Image (cartoon, grey):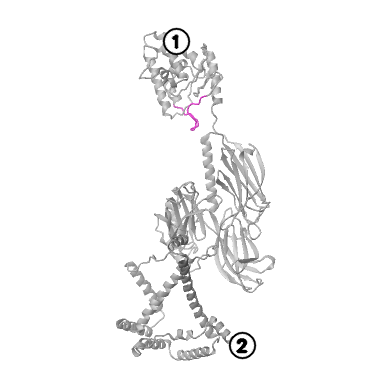
Amino acid sequence: MDSKKSGMLWHLRHKMLPHLRRGKTSSSKSLVQLEHAMDHRMSSSVPDMRDMRQEYAQISPSTRLQQYTSPSYSSPSSPFVKPARGPGGGGSGLKMGAAGGGAGRSEHRLSVPADCPDWASSQESFNSLYEEEMSSPETNYRPARGMEPEELALPEMMTVYTSDVPSVEVSQDSSQSDMGNETMSVSDNTRIPPRSYLLTINLKEGRNLVIRDRCGTSDPYVKFKLEGKTFYKSKVVYKELNPTWNETFSLPVKDLNQKLYIKVYDRDLTTDDFMGSASVTLGDLETDKVNELSLPLDDPNSLEEDMGVVLVDMSLSLRDGDSKRGQAGGSSQSFRLSESLRKSQLWTSVVSVTLVEGQELPLDTQGGQLFVRFRLGEQRYRSKNHCKVAKPQWRERFTLNQYLDGPGVLEVELWSKEGRRTEECLGTCEVDLSRVPFNQRQLFTHTLDHGRGRLVFLLTQNTCSGVSISDLCAAPLDEPHEQQNQLDNYSLKRSLSNLRDVGFLQVKVIKAADLLAADLNGKSDPFCVLELGNDRLQTHTIYKSLYPEWNKVFTFPVKDIHDVLVVTIFDEDGDKAPDFLGKIAIPLLSIRRGQQIACPLKKEDLGGLSKGSITLELEVIFNPVRASIRTFQPRERRFMEDNPKFSKKALARNVLRVQTLYRAIMSTLQYIKSCFQWESVQRSLLAFLVFVVTVWYWEFYMLPFFLVLLISWNYLQIRSGRVSQDVDNMDLGDEDEDDEKESERRGLMEKIHMVQDTIITLQNLLDEIACFGERIKNTFNWSVPFLSSLAFLVFAIATIITYYIPIRYIVLIWGINKFTKKLRKPYSIDNNEVLDFLTRVPSDVQKVQYSEMRGSRKKKTL
């Protein structure tokens, strides 16, 4: 082991051992020789142990405790002792400060953390060594408890470096002056911790940006990325190619060799369009100076040469303070970013819009449809399609949320649609919401651009205070006072005070578990989106985790108690669209108050199960009277619905649903028919008596009373367990996955036949519905004069009969005839006179076919 120690301790041991052997010299002589050896072999940067013993004896015990328990500050990442080379060739990481002056040093403080157990143990050993020396009559140093002599002379944490230099006697004064110089050298040459910089960015404006919208403009916003992560996202400037942002933010950075990427996007409803990017190397920036940059945008995948520029001011300054302060600054920056994300989602008011009608609209072409599109920031609402007339009547109502930092202009556009993909904007107008007073309905009749008609709509702006985002420890309903306020607000006593404010929903998004791994590293960057109707809030992103814990509380104002809370988990994927991880849907009426639930995640169509689960705690408070009134009002539509796509599985499912309903109706009709056929004498006799008594004593109140009995009967059946409400036989599985499984079992021809059978069934069903309606129409338009005359005669006779004979007797006679027909004519054929008559009336397809046949006969006769 001694062969491995080639430093100071090995030389010191061999040169001091002759002076420390017992029984060779007197105690006084050994002490003088020890002091002489230490004077010549220790570096001048190490405190003289003799002076340290003398001063330590003069200091009171309380002062000793104060000195050695005083806190010391150092970087936690740095070692306790740092070697440093000085002019004398040796140095030490042990820092000694000299305070006072005159006779000598008054105190010596070791720059070692006070809570270090190694230093505490070394200090105890040093104190015990000094006490043993003062109490023992012998003053020589002797090994104790198996310790080496160098361990007795020096503390454990002290590391001494020396070089092979000749022994030179040094006086006490000169050693003190060298000690002071070496102390300065140690502090100057100690390893400097990594520097931290503060990058301040002022995003000013963009110029001549590219067009990404069909209306000839763009909705640009900017993302700033560093180390592959987006750390700032600007606001969206709508309909502007020369946007002005004027946003300032700061970020702590440590590595100036990395690049800062600036990417511009056009905000769209689904996927944002890329408008170009630029990069800045942080090392190229001048420190402590504002760098005014004009960054040209570029896209390697685009053929556009000039994509515009972004004007940015950047300043880089050296941060003061140690690493702990730097960490605190970083956490405060992330807190500010999280706070910015929270504030950008909260809306302060709600704009209620009622689209009434259009006036004097242009009719360039016959046919086609008209619709109106409203736009407030990122929210877009599209009205129903109306046939193209000069004065269309829409009569629709919807609401838009007004955000604190959002635009204050409501954009209204009139569009014409011909076919599936051909759309044309006929005119636009704008409404400045800052001029619309709160809680007052105002009528607007705006003239479109170029005088192409007018649009009439109503606007009402109301304040909203029911939306919030908070931490789990600050949930609103967890406070008794706030919960009591909400209960009072939605109590029965205040049912008619504010009919549109139906209730209050609190959602605690706690955590998710066992999510899908969407990234290549086997992890995901999940965030959670909550949607209630057209209201939307989201959590922050938890990076590189399959078991994220958000611990956030969201509150929503409830407009309709029949809404469904949709919670979707996405994986943040940088500039690309987020990846879907899982989804659940919870109707508000199914929420059990204050109960924590762990819901398994489902696929995007909510048909099958996905991987993972999410833990929520839901609580809803609502007024039943307001909710009941709201039930009989039109349901709020989604802002913008995607164009439907063809799905053979959805087609087959819908056909199956129609067939199921058709079979249920036919089963009911067959039951009634069996009563007329006397298949069961007891049942037919009972039905006949009920029919006669009901018709004879019929009053109109009996109709709702019969519906009450029907609902009560079904309730008793469900409560007794005889009837189940579960729908288990409907297949909602993912189409792509089922197609893959199906392709393994079936060949191409079998799949073609399956699709063909489904389409044929749908074709026949649609044909029957269309024929039924066309035959009723052709009965009244004299397509077949004989049938129309016959219908005229029947209706005339029915008019006379019902004028002189009460309807009660007519229905009674019809029922007796139906019940006794089977008894009078056992072998008669069942028929329905009305349907039999309609089968003789041709449909439109048959009319065209018959007219072609008549035309061909005329040609033959000529």
Q: Nearer the viewer, residue 389 or 699?
A: 389
Q: Earlier in the sequence, mark 2 or mark 1?
A: 1
Please report the residue visible at 50 percent of the width from the left and 26 percent of the height from the top.
Answer: 82
Residue type of the residue flagged with mark 1: Gln
Q: Quadrant of the C terminus?
A: bottom right
Residue underneath mark 1: 33
Please state the horizontal and vertical placement of residue 608, each as a whole percent of the image: 43, 59
Please state the horizontal and vertical placement of residue 855, each as a whole percent of the image: 59, 86
- Residue 442 seen: no
Residue 300 against residue 814 in the figure, above or below? above
Q: Is residue 144 magenta?
A: no
Classify mark 2: helix, strand or loop: helix
Magenta stretch in the rendered image: 69-83
Residue 789 against residue 444 in the figure, above or below? below
Q: Is residue 74 magenta?
A: yes
| Direction right: furthest residue | 450
The answer to the question of whether label 2 and label 1 lie on touching residues, with beta carbons closer than 8 A, is no
Prevailing secondary structure class for the magenta stretch in the rendered image: loop
Occupied quadrant, residue 33: top left
Q: Quadrant of the N terminus?
A: top left
Residue underneath mark 2: 859
Please report the residue visible at 52 percent of the width from the left and 44 percent of the height from the top.
Answer: 335
Residue type of the residue flagged with mark 2: Lys
Classify mark 1: helix, strand or loop: helix
Label 1 environment density (alpha carbons within 10 Å; few <14, some 14–19, many ≥20): some
| Direction left: furthest residue | 682
Label 2 and label 1: CA atoms lie apart by 144 Å
Residue 376 against residue 10 in the figure, above or below? below
Q: Which label sits in the foreground, 2 or 1?
A: 2
